[in-house]
Amino acid sequence: MSNEPEFQHGTPSKTGVLLINLGTPDAPTKEALRPYLREFLSNPRVIEVPRLIWWPILYGFILPFRPKQSAEKYALIWTSEGSPLKVHTERQTALLAEALQNSANPAPMVEYAMNIGNPSVASVVNKMAEAGCDRILIIPLFPQYAASSTAAAMDAVFAALGSVRNMPAIRTVKQYHDHSGYIAALAQNIRDYWEQHGQPDKLIISFHGVPRRNLDKGDPYHCFCQKTGRLLAEALNLGEEQYQVCFQSRFGRAQWLQPYTAETLEQLGKAQTRRVDITCPGFVSDCLETLEEIAIEGKKTFTEAGGKEYHYIPCLNERADWIDALSEITRSNLQGWLEPAPSQEMLEQSKQRALAMGAHK
Ligand SMILES: C=CC1=C(C)c2cc3[nH]c(cc4nc(cc5[nH]c(cc1n2)c(C)c5CCC(=O)O)C(CCC(=O)O)=C4C)c(C)c3C=C
Ligand SMILES: [Fe+2]
Ligand SMILES: [Fe+2]
């Protein structure tokens, strides 16, 4: 790292909090989608197929076609401020910084980074190290741990630290799929929606899928999604017939976690289900996967199969109860790092002692 500050005796510790989300293209165009998809789908945490088999598929069949198809989908959900995922992540970061304002003196530096695209994890980790953060708490914005999302984000942090000489202490939050504040916020979001729009016959709780073989190889993601779904249903007092956990966004031809959301919606439509509501607790921000795949495509699938009414319930986004939960998760993982900073006098004394003992400055 080129601008790393020189070590100074008597410098108080500075704490940083880094939120990491998946990432999104810079624009809803095929030119912006190509490098985004190339970076995403080149990550062995995401695609576990041997490289010799995967490269011809990626470069021969996916990158020539998918950027255009995906760009058309992004264009449907793009806002005047940019990609919804980025807009919500930015706002959540500002709200968390505000919530932590009085937690310590100085208040922690709160930043966000994207694992794919901008701002990159490397650029933000370097910025925090340059600003003097010698302790950084990493919080992936994925409540349910998966190797393809959470571990990939952690890999990016440690890769970035490879070029930092005075490496900060790092703490990581692995998961918060069963955190009481997170579950309560999810439940209240749904109750608020039902108060305004009435209740459905069935609530679909849809999570992003991963290949089925990841579960067989020991990835706990499936179990964490099931637990979030069950806790959410319990908080809403739903009986087993009133909800279903499903998995969306299947990519490629391999078997993914089941039941698939699209197939379930089709079956419910064919069964003439009057009304289905759908919620996506694995995404804390609305994004392509919720606004296009679930809100737009899902509705088409359900109604074309014969279903009557379909409601998509938005993600937690900037809800105050979610920001409170995120702040609670942050504070409990910062324990011991939020102690009052030593006084100027104490710092000066420690510096003078170091100088008297022959320190370099
Ligand atoms: C919530 C956690 C996520 C997991 C787990 C996850 C796994 C996973 N994803 C793909 C392939 C794609 N995902 C894409 C978009 C996307 N994925 C997540 C989250 C998880 N993915 C989010 C939040 C988004 C949306 C980003 C946005 O800009 O709004 C895409 C790109 C879009 C597209 O072309 O369809 C792909 C591709 C795999 C293969 C995978 C696990 C192995
Ligand atoms: Fe994904
Ligand atoms: Fe399981």
Image (cartoon, rainbow, N blue to C red):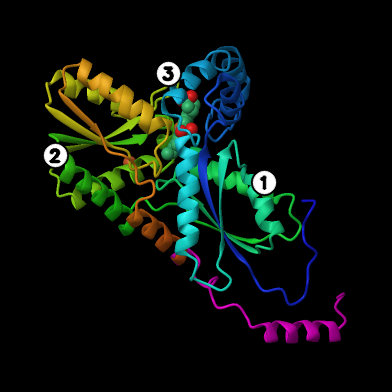
Q: In this rendering, which labeled residue sits more in front, label 3 or label 2?
A: 2
Is 85 included in the stretch rendered in magenta?
no
The percent coordinates of residue 25 (x first, y second) are 55, 30
Mark 1 sits on what residue? 123
Q: In this rendering, which labeled residue sits more in front, label 1 or label 3?
A: 1
Residue at 33% across, 32% down: 247
Q: Which circle's residue, 3 or 2, is located before the other in the chain?
A: 2
| Residue type at tag 2 | Gln
How far apart are the two marked residues, 1 and 2, measured between alpha carbons? Answer: 45 Å
Secondary structure under tag 2 reads loop
Mark 3 sits on what residue? 253
Q: Which residues are magenta?
A: 332-361
| Residue type at tag 1 | Ser
Secondary structure under tag 3 reads loop
Q: Which one is nearer the viewer's eye here, 54 or 361?
A: 361
Q: Is mark 2 within 8 Å of ligand 1?
A: no
| Quadrant of res 64 | top right
Mark 2 sits on what residue? 199
| Residue type at tag 3 | Arg
Residue at 60% across, 39% down: 118
Asked if the residue under mark 2 is in contact with the one under mark 1, i.e. CB atoms within 8 Å, the reply is no
Q: Quadrant of the C terminus?
A: bottom right
How far apart are the two marked residues, 3 and 2, measured between alpha carbons? Answer: 35 Å
How packed mark 2 is, by other alpha carbons closer than 10 Å (few <14, some 14-19, many 20 or more), is some
> Which quarter holds ligand 3?
top left
Question: Left or right: where does residue 318 sit relative to residue 311?
Answer: right
Question: Left or right: where does residue 307 sit relative to residue 47?
Answer: left
The percent coordinates of residue 82 (x first, y second) are 50, 34
Is 350 included in the stretch rendered in magenta?
yes
Q: Which one is nearer the viewer's eye here, 227 or 164?
A: 164
The percent coordinates of residue 145 (x first, y second) are 44, 46
